[in-house]
């Protein structure tokens, strides 16, 4: 399973609203301690453009601020003000997800005639790498690089053989690449034993920058099919056309338009929590696969990837029990996720694209979020 990294300069970057090249800065500070080790917060800023904070605990993007159509900075991701919030309880806010993003049925899969048993942390199923996935570990800050229009933060983690039940020592590198109007992830991984890998990023976006539901956002997903799920949110194996239904986002549609429609699939997911099969499948070069925009703020986000699928989650399980940044209580559907990935439960469904990584192979994939103002 080889996934190719492409040059980000191959993708047209939206113009930043300034005549001179924006100045950039990168600073760091302590974000607390985890298991006796210091956690670092890295702060990225471009004059007149994006400002973001990233911690090496879970590779979490804790804040992402962008200018709206009036020039006011809006923080467009959900999260906490401090490390304690993430340690106490977090529905994967802003985190790197691994070893396997999304669900594996019954926490089991068979590889090379060996059955592996994983944690069941989502009812009867395994979700996002288990009880202590990559979102709940301390990543090494391997390197940083700062230029006028690009800041790169390189993270590294060694997932030991048997961690959360997965086989093989998996060495993972993730480069976060920030520009004045975008952030991207370059993922690489290698193993000394056959294993399964499906990495993604789990930021919750709200482009209004306010404490309001995301139902007034407009979404486009360039996908003609999606994966129906059963009552435990595992794909049935069917690839179903989206045409003219509640799952049709082939052109911009307001998220709230059909989210409460009487539909078995929407009932299973308590809204949208499904995987869309992106047109073109796995690609060599990154292409645009989705767009999200909010009329009130004017902020638009375009999603680029080489991955074959995208999980759209509409924040259905946010339940007003979480107090996030600036004392905001995150209520039902106050944020949404657009997670680029391979299909859920792929280790158990031979018809799905393979997620197997073997010794001597290199796992590579890339995703980019580009922001602008309409």
Image: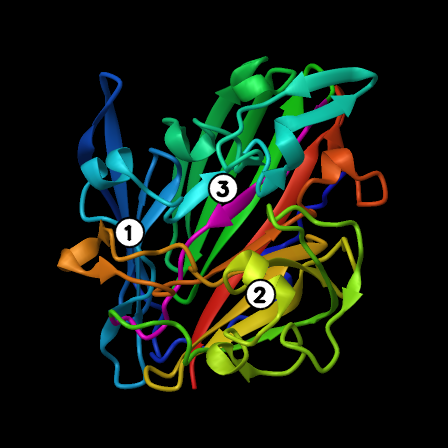
**Picture quarter with the C terminus:** bottom left
**Picture quarter with the N terminus:** top right
- Name the residue located 22 percent from the left edge and 37 percent from the top edge: 83
Is 98 drawn above or below residue 152 in the view shown? above
* Start-end of magenta stretch: 195-210
Of tags 1 and 2, the one toward the viewer is 2
Instruction: Report if the CB atoms under discs 1 and 3 are less than 8 Å apart.
Output: no
Is 94 drawn above or below residue 126 in the view shown? below
- Would residue 309 be seen by someone viewing this image from the given angle? yes
* 373 displayed left or right of 108: left
Residue 275 placed where, x, y %? 64, 57
Marks 1 and 3, Cα distance to the nearest angstrom?
21 Å
Check residue 205 for magenta coloring: yes
- Name the residue located 34 percent from the left edge and 72 percent from the top edge: 213
Q: Which residue matches tag 1?
A: 79
Point out the tag, 2 or 3, that comes first from the N-terminus. 3
Residue 170 placed where, x, y %? 60, 21
Classify 10 Å Cα crowding around label 1: few (below 14), some (14-19), many (20 and above).
Answer: many
In which image quadrant can residue 36 be found?
A: top left
Viewer-nearest residue: 251 or 314: 314
* 176 displayed left or right of 282: left
In which image quadrant can residue 24 be found?
A: bottom left
* Residue 175: mark: 3
Q: Which residue matches tag 2?
A: 266
Is 194 drawn above or below residue 205 in the view shown? above
Instruction: Report if the CB atoms under discs 2 and 3 are less than 8 Å apart.
Output: no
Prevailing SS of the magenta stretch: loop
- Name the residue located 48 percent from the left edge and 32 percent from the top edge: 121
Point out the tag, 1 or 3, that comes first from the N-terminus. 1
């Amino acid at each position: 399973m080889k996934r190719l990294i492409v040059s980000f300069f191959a993708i047209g970057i939206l113009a930043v609203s300034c005549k001179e090249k924006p100045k950039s800065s990168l600073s760091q500070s302590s974000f607390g301690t985890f298991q006796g080790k210091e956690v670092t917060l890295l702060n990225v800023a471009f004059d007149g453009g994006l400002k973001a904070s990233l911690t090496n605990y879970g590779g979490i993007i804790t804040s992402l601020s962008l200018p709206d159509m009036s020039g006011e900075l809006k923080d467009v991701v959900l999260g906490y003000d401090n490390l304690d919030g993430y340690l106490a309880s977090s529905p994967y806010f802003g985190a790197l997800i691994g070893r396997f993003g999304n669900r594996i049925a019954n926490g089991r899969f068979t590889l090379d005639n060996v059955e592996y048993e994983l944690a069941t942390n989502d009812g009867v199923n395994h979700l996002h790498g288990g009880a202590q996935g990559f979102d709940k570990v301390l990543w090494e800050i391997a390197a940083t690089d700062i230029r006028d229009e690009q800041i790169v933060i390189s993270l590294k983690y060694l997932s030991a053989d048997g961690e959360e039940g997965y086989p093989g020592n998996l060495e993972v590198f993730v480069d976060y690449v920030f520009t004045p109007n975008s952030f991207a992830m370059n993922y690489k991984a290698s193993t000394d034993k056959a294993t399964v890998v499906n990495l993604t990023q789990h930021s919750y976006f709200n482009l209004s920058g306010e404490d309001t539901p995301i139902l007034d956002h407009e979404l486009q997903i360039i996908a003609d099919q999606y994966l129906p799920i059963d009552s435990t949110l595992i794909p049935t194996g069917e690839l179903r056309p989206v045409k003219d239904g509640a799952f049709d986002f082939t052109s911009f549609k307001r998220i709230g338009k059909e989210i409460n429609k009487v539909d078995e699939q929407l009932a299973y997911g308590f809204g949208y929590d499904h995987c869309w099969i992106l047109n073109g499948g796995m690609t060599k070069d990154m292409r645009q696969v989705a767009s999200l925009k909010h009329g009130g703020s004017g902020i638009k986000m375009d999603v680029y990837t080489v991955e074959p699928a995208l999980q759209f989650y509409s924040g259905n399980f946010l339940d007003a029990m979480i107090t996030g940044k600036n004392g905001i209580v995150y209520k039902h559907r106050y944020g949404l996720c657009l997670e680029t990935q391979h299909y859920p439960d792929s280790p158990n469904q031979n018809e799905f694209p393979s997620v197997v990584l073997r010794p001597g192979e290199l796992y590579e994939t890339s995703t980019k979020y580009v922001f602008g103002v309409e």
